[in-house]
Image: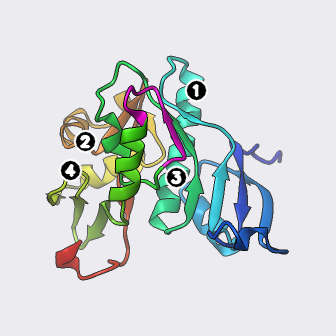
Amino acid sequence: MTATAPHFAIRAWRDFDPQARRLPGMSLGSLPVTAQTHEVDRLWDLGVRHAELDADVDLSTDDPAAHRRAVDRLCLVRDLTARAVSVDWDLRLPPRESAHHWKVLSHLQPPRTITGLEDAQEALHAWRTRHYLCKLVWRQGPGFVQIRDRRWGDLRRFTADEPRYREAIVLLGTGVRHADVDADVLREFTAEHLVLRVGELAWWLPYRVSRWLQEAMAV
């Protein structure tokens, strides 16, 4: 059986600190990455604590193949953020989008650069200075799912106990054609800015949390 080809590769290190990364044995070299939900667990077990993407996350193109590549890389950034693994990446946004479009992604590790916005440096500064872990997370309880969102400054909660919401989250997790998701659920998630549309793909923005970093009332 032929092995599945990697979607892309990352450069990886055993430590997040720039000076420590220069020490012998800290570099893990180039690692292949596939778009699978357990991929970050594998990288963590290998010792990855800092990663660098191999290409921009380009949301400015109309090319469907580029949309898939962008979503695959966003999946990795999201899941590395959930693990508190630092990541160097670059974001390219469509110029026609709102100047606040970056806020939808502001729960992720801040990128090195943003292009496509007139006030890109201002947006990047705001992203870096206001970022913290668990800014947009989801959890699965006994018979329900809950999303907690602080990207806009206040705490917004979305709780659902119908199985179709959980089923939609599973589909959206790695990015799926929007037509393949329950239309009513997708409409609700989109209205709450919990889904990013990239061409024909719809992608789940929150990352999953299994343990709060502080008391649940404060998250």
CB atoms of marks 3 and 1 within 8 Å:
no
State which tag comes first along the sequence, 4 or 3: 3
User: Dot 1, crowdedness within 10 Å: few (<14), some or many (≥20)?
Assistant: some
State which tag comes first along the sequence, 3 or 1: 1
Q: Which amino acid is tagged 4?
A: Trp
**Residue 15 in magenta?**
no
The magenta segment: 111-120
Mark 4 vs mark 3, CA separation in Å: 20 Å
Q: Which amino acid is tagged 1?
A: Ala
The answer to whether residue 205 of the structure is visible from this angle is no
User: Residue visible at 21% across and 68% down?
Assistant: 143
Q: Which amino acid is tagged 3?
A: Val
Identify the secondary structure beneath mark 4: loop
Identify the secondary structure beneath mark 1: helix
The circle drawn on residue 152 is 4
State which tag comes first along the sequence, 1 or 4: 1
Along the horizontal axis of the image, is 10 left or right of 165?
Answer: right
Which numbered disc, 4 or 3, marks the residue closer to the eye? 4
User: Dot 3, crowdedness within 10 Å: few (<14), some or many (≥20)?
Assistant: many
User: Residue visible at 51% across and 20% down?
Assistant: 61
Which residue is under mark 1? 66
Above or below: residue 64 compared with residue 77: above
Which residue is under mark 3? 77
Residue found farthest to the bottom: 215
Which residue is under mark 2? 193
Mark 2 vs mark 1, CA separation in Å: 22 Å
Mark 3 vs mark 2, CA separation in Å: 18 Å
Q: x%, y% of residue 24?
A: 85, 74
User: Residue visible at 45% across and 26% down?
Assistant: 116
Along the horizontal axis of the image, is 153 left or right of 80?
Answer: left
Above or below: residue 40 compared with residue 186: below
Q: Which amino acid is tagged 2?
A: His
